Amino acid sequence: MEWTTEAEARLKEIPFFVRPAARKKIEKFAQTAGIAQITVEIYEQAKQQFGSKN
């Protein structure tokens, strides 16, 4: 799964110990929606879907 530089930067704001799980959830969200690239917009949509406040 390809991530934009901006989306990767947002992912790095998540604490390192939960980052791998967050990445998997976001990528699964995008895959389910038929999206091939994670952008900041997709990142934000996934966060809202999972109820994250960060």
Image: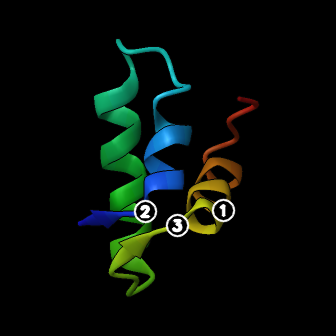
SS at badge 1: helix
Disc 3, disc 2: CB below 8 Å? Answer: yes
10 with respect to 21 (left or right): right
Specify which label sits upstream in the sequence, 3 or 1: 3
Q: Position of residue 21 (x, y in %)?
A: 33, 33
Q: Residue furthest left?
A: 1
* Crowd tier of the residue under label 3, counting other residues whose Cα lies within 10 Å: few below 14, some 14–19, many 20 or above: some
* Residue at 54% across, 53% down: 6
Residue 2, position in %: x, y? 28, 67
Please identify the quadrant where the N terminus is shown: bottom left
Task: Give the secondary structure at mark 3.
Answer: loop
CA distance for labels 1 and 2: 15 Å
- Is 53 situated left or right of 38 in this image? right
Mark 2 or mark 1, which is nearer the start of the sequence? 2
Residue 40 position (above or below residue 50): below
Quarter of image, res 35:
bottom left
Residue at the disc numbered 2: 4
From the viewer's perspective, tell me whether residue 13 is left or right of residue 4. Answer: right
Are circles 1 and 2 on residues that touch, CB within 8 Å?
no
Q: In the current view of this chain or complex, which residue is farthest to the front?
A: 5
Left or right: 45, with 15 as reference point: right
Classed neighbour count for the residue bearing mark 1: other residues with Cα under 10 Å, few (<14), some (14–19), many (≥20): some
Please name the amino acid that badge 3 sits on: Thr
Tell me residue 25's x, y (percent): 39, 49
The answer to which image quadrant residue 31 occupies is bottom left
| Residue pointed to by mark 1 | 45
